[in-house]
Image (spheres, coloured by chain):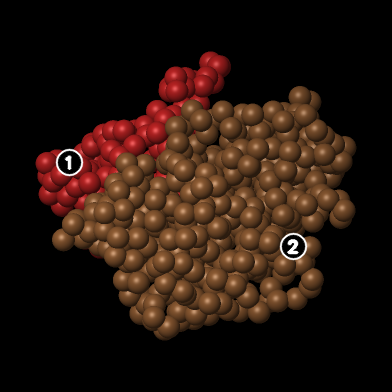
Amino acid sequence: MNRYMLILWGGGARTAKMSPQEIQEHMKHWNTWMESLSKKGIWDGGEPLGAEARLVKGAGKPVTDGPYTEAKEAVSGYVILKADSMEKACDISKDCPLFEIDGIVEVRPIRTM
Amino acid sequence: MPDRPEQPGQVSELVDHLFRQQAGKMVSVLSRILGFQNIGTAEEIVQETLLSALQVWSFRGVPPNPGGWLMVAARNRAIDHIRRERSRLKVAEDLRLKLRSEWTLSTTVDREFEQSRISDHLLRMIFTCCDPRLRPEDQVALTLKFPGAFSVPEIAAALLCEEETVRKRLYRARQKLREDRGALQMPPDPELGARLDSALQVVYLIFNEGYKSAEGESLIRAELCEEAMRLASLLAEHPSCAQPKTFALLALMCFQAARLSTRTYENGSIRQLEEQDRAGWDADLISRGFHFMDLSASGTELTRYHVEAAIASCHCGASSFEETDWRTIVTLYGRLLSIYDTPVVRLNRAIAIGFAEGAQAAVRELDRIQRDGGLARYYLLHASLGEFTMRAGDFASATAHFEKAAKMCKSPAEKEFLLGRIARCSA
């Protein structure tokens, strides 16, 4: 089985305006989705990422903020999935709650030897 | 922070409305520390805290003590914020020096976040929002916004008004509160009584907003009843506010809420008291109502909440509509009139008289109210006139009254009910 990384982009502009009640309801959808991945046995890791970001361009060069111009559009985390094919990985991604908040999922195959 | 589980979704189920309730607490503690003038900053810190929970818990599942997790996260963010803004920030006056020094910063913040103090802060926030110098509608909006943690769109949906109207009310109220420096203080003892009265009134307004049209049209309105009962419970738990009138209001709301779900048919139209399925009334809420009524029965002050709770208890205690003790209810309405005389109370008394003494007696009372003129534009007066003239056999006047009522009433469910009555008169 192949492995794919789902890179979770954006969504922050919408969540910034959500009420506490809406945040709680939205989180339920994430818990359900993540749980479904793990029940199907296709979850292979994942982490949430903080919004702070720095670009390091080499020794002696200044470290800069970036690459995002708007922190709300930053990558908020990644998930690694086991799937037969790119198509399958994309299908699974379609249920991701990130779309409820106008985010985008980037699906990338993880290379093997 | 707990270790990451190998698999996500080891989810402990979150209590309903946990985020909303914790947000109300967090914003109360934070604005105690930062001062009411910085309540906007307090809200930002709360939002960041909830969003970090959203992100982390989505991956790692809900932690064993979610409420505690949120409080710690808010505390850490508050300390970061104070450090970062130290030179510019104008915090609460009495904490200024302690927050300025690195030696005392975190212990000072910790102290305000202590479990035992959180409910004090929440209470202070309620009292600040229920300042009697503000207009009642502004007090309601402010109370829903801060201790209640409803968003502007949620408040607008719940109160059936425009978001812009809610924003204006909040702005006006905050300007007014900013003017005095005493904000977010517990009112001093001599003022506490007046302030508690105001808080109880706001709680009851919130409850009635939810109650009067919990016709299943929107969930958020039913949530108002729940929020009002939660606020009243908070008041009742605090030694300075655990007074007979607070318990009386709680009793009243329990009795009313117990009947909430049977007030409408599945299609949303109104079900009259006579037609309600009493087996569907919430027995648990009713027994809580009687419990609070016992607690309210002390002291010398008789409030409208006492009498209204007693009236509601007559309904909840009757096993059928026929067995309702209407004579006692009429007497209670008389007593209510002596402390809280409004045309609507007169109307309710007239209806009770109708059930106790017959339709003719009700029509006489209702005619008198109509002559007084206070309720000329109130559809329930005309609907009641229709009902009792119909019961008295005068179908022509009944039809006219029902038609007048139908023209005035705004709720589709109630309009449908009235049209049904008109059809019955001509059958």
Look at chain B in the picture and name its colour: brown
Instruction: Write down which chain is painted red.
Output: A
The residue labelled by disc 2 is B241
Picture quadrant where residue B175 is located: top right
Furthest-top residue in view? A61
Q: Nearer the viewer, residue B324 or B258?
A: B324
In the rendered image, residue B129, in percent from the top left (x then y), is placed at 67, 43
Judge from the rendering whether residue A9 lies leftward or rightward of residue A108; answer left or right: right
Name the residue located 54 percent from the left edge and 40 percent from the top edge: B47
Left or right: A77 as drawn, with respect to A5: right
Above or below, comparing residue B251 to residue A110 in the picture: below
Q: Which residue is mark 1?
A: A90
The secondary element bearing badge 1 is classed as helix
Q: Chain of mark 1?
A: A
Q: Please identify the quarter of the rendering in which residue B390 is found.
A: bottom left
Question: What residue do we see at 26% from left, 58% from top?
Answer: B395
Residue type, mark 1 in image: Cys
Type of amino acid under label 2: Cys
Locate the C terminus of chain B and report the quarter of the image it occupies.
bottom left
Mark 2, chain letter? Answer: B
